[in-house]
Image: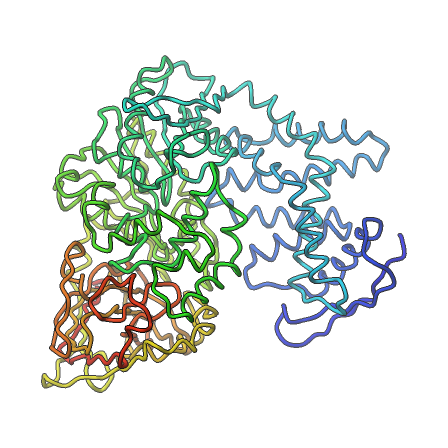
Amino acid sequence: MKKFFLLVFILLCGTLFSQKIFIQRAEKINADNLAGFVAYLALELEKTYTEKDKTVFYDNLFRINMVSGKQNLALQRLDSVRRFYLASNPDAAHAMGTQYEVYMKTLQHTAHGKEFAAAYTDELYKKYQTLSLQSQILLPRYFDIDLLRLQKEIDDLLKSEFTRKDSVDIKTALLLCRKYNSYHVAKESFKYADPLLKKWEAHTFTVRDSLLITSKKGHDISIRVVLNNTIKKGSSIVVNTIYSQPDDVNDAKEIASRGYMCVYINARGKFLGHQKIEPFEHEHEDINEVIDWIVKQPWSNGKVGMIGGSYLGFSQWAATKKLHPALKTIIPQVAVGIGIDYPMQNNIFMSYMLQWLDYVTGTPTVNQESFSDRKKWMKIYRDWYTSGKPFNQLDAISGKKDDLFQRWLQHPSYDRYWQNMAPVSEDYAKINIPVLTTTGYFDDDQIGALTYYQNHTRYHKQADHYLIIGPYDHGGGQGYIKNRIAGLNIDPAANINLKEVCFQWFDYILGGKEKPVFLKDKINYEVIGKNAWKSAASMDEFDKHKRKYYLDEKMKLSPARNKPGYCSTLKVDLKDRSDADRILKYSSDIITDSLPGTNHYLAYTTDPFREETEITGAFSGTLSFAVNKKDCDISMNLYEVLPDGKYFLLSKYIGRASYAEDPAIRKLLVPNAITTIPVKNTTFISKKIEKGSRLMLLVGINKNPSWQINYGTGKDVSEESVKDAGEPLEIKWYNDSYIEIPFSKE
């Protein structure tokens, strides 16, 4: 081995990522000695690296083992990673890491003199043959990498973290090992894999990847079609996306492998489209135009279903606004509630909307590099917050005016602009197709997903609508379930194969097979801490055993109302921006050791529970208060304070007081007069509450770089600035305020 430039030892103190690998250089890092340098880093990481999340731990560890040259051990660790995903996504579990497995096994053969290219072809084919069709079609995504970009990332990392420095932390060393390993494997072997995979797949699929169809109004719509060659005529599954990328074809193949034809629609102006990109505004027209086209094709049997998450989930509801007779079912997953939970939640616009618009509207595909630059966006949000400028100048602070951002800000009410994009009451009444909704307790779009569900079942009394909800984040609600999310280890029972349930649903509706056995009733939910699924016929069941807790003046959540007229007072200086860094750096984990360090809230707490119980549903309530402004933005977080002192975030609410009665009509407050408003659109959860736990409710004013700031003048909030702050906001929470919590009767 070449002599290289480091003497390594580990300083065992502090947290893992504060540990240092100290470096004494003998020469400059270059192409000749980089492999040796990274190998020594890997050897030291093997001694010290650990991680609470075992999925992450073994995923990193097998890569470290590869770099250090321990191929057999790396293969064992890779199998450990796969086992974590076998229950929730077996197709992906068997396919993941194939690029590394085949490379390592090829090296084992070439060590005995066999030529690399021939050995690689043999190993890849052997692996390919062991996989199901669903796993086979996942393989291309594991062999898709931008070598030039990855090389630049490695060079940038070396320059910023390893040049003229005496040490690196464990996290940085790990990052370099991962990037180097990915680059090395891709450079040496991916050129062989790509043509082989394409050749083998061609027997199963016909891909029409660059189609443009013309609508009745003359605009073009860019679509891609994947046909299953084993079927002459079949049902079609449609996916409508704003996140257009070349590798969408791999997702389309995955759907087609299930016995369907698949059509991917790119939102107007995306991929090969020529129109202006205007998210959300045209789906209700364009999807139906494409369905018209599909049913006229010789491979279509006239039946269409839809699936997809987030924006793709919204798209399905948009399509039902004018329901096409060929559309037989939809599976909206974590569906964005346009105008409801995005780009504003309960009428409060979020800073993230600008980041998202930059992501999807700047190019025909997506602007991944900019979107993923967390430091850049956190700085933009911080700069806006500390400047005190109006929210409508956020795009200018980012350095680029955004017309859509400004257009959205012109609609702070849930008005016709938003209502035209998705179903309203009279539309829901006509949606007579079966629907399967999926979301999670920690999904950012849970409120949107459940709003669609509740409106459908409200306006269509016989709605055939099923719901699956569990301890999932935005990805988990789309089937990408992780064993650990935001500090919470999910129950084993929650780690279901959601993707399989969804295709069983398609087989049930489009193919006449049995209904998925997982769906016991209309609402199917997992109880955190009980490791069990339960079911209910409707949301009304969760409201039968609600308990009322008053916000009394002694800072208690009290089941009994005290003598009326007393209050608790909170003062918030809307001019103060000294808390910017503290807010942006605060951990948003589900389970935390401490609460947000802020004076924007008051805390109300119950007595400890004498016995174990269960909460299932979303809390609601009524707030009675007086504030010295014409408006305010209210924030509420409901926690379980565990017996060990940790805090478990159960549910949350954020909303503009002036829209609490009706999100379409703003009703300003009378300063210092007692006002009563409802609390609704809070998040849903099901969880076992431990004996000895207490419930804590934080009630306060939203003042955060991630959201608009409401200064209370009554003007358009987007136009207000710190100059409008005036005297500190003072709000009095009266003791007839209460929340109602849905407890489950065992």
Residue 706: % across, % down: 39, 63
Relative to 746, say whether 134 is above or below. above
Relative to 431, say whether 72 is above or below. below
Nearest to the observer: residue 251 or residue 156: 156
Relative to 253, say whether 553 is above or below. below
Kindly indicate the quadrant of the structure image that contains residue 544.
bottom left
Residue 725: % across, % down: 29, 75
Residue drawn at x 56%, y 58% is 54
Q: How many marks?
A: 0
Q: Would residue 111 be visible to someone looking at this image?
A: yes
Q: Quadrant of the C terminus?
A: bottom left
Residue 180: % across, % down: 71, 49
601 horizontally vs 142: left or right: left
Nearest to the observer: residue 5 or residue 143: 5
Kindly indicate the quadrant of the structure image that contains residue 346.
bottom left
Relative to 12, say whether 130 is above or below. above
Residue drawn at x 32%, y 20% is 293
The figure's colour scheme reads rainbow
Q: Would residue 695 be visible to someone looking at this image?
A: no
Residue 455: % across, % down: 18, 46
399 horizontally vs 561: left or right: right
112 horizontally vs 674: left or right: right
Nearest to the observer: residue 192 or residue 688: 192
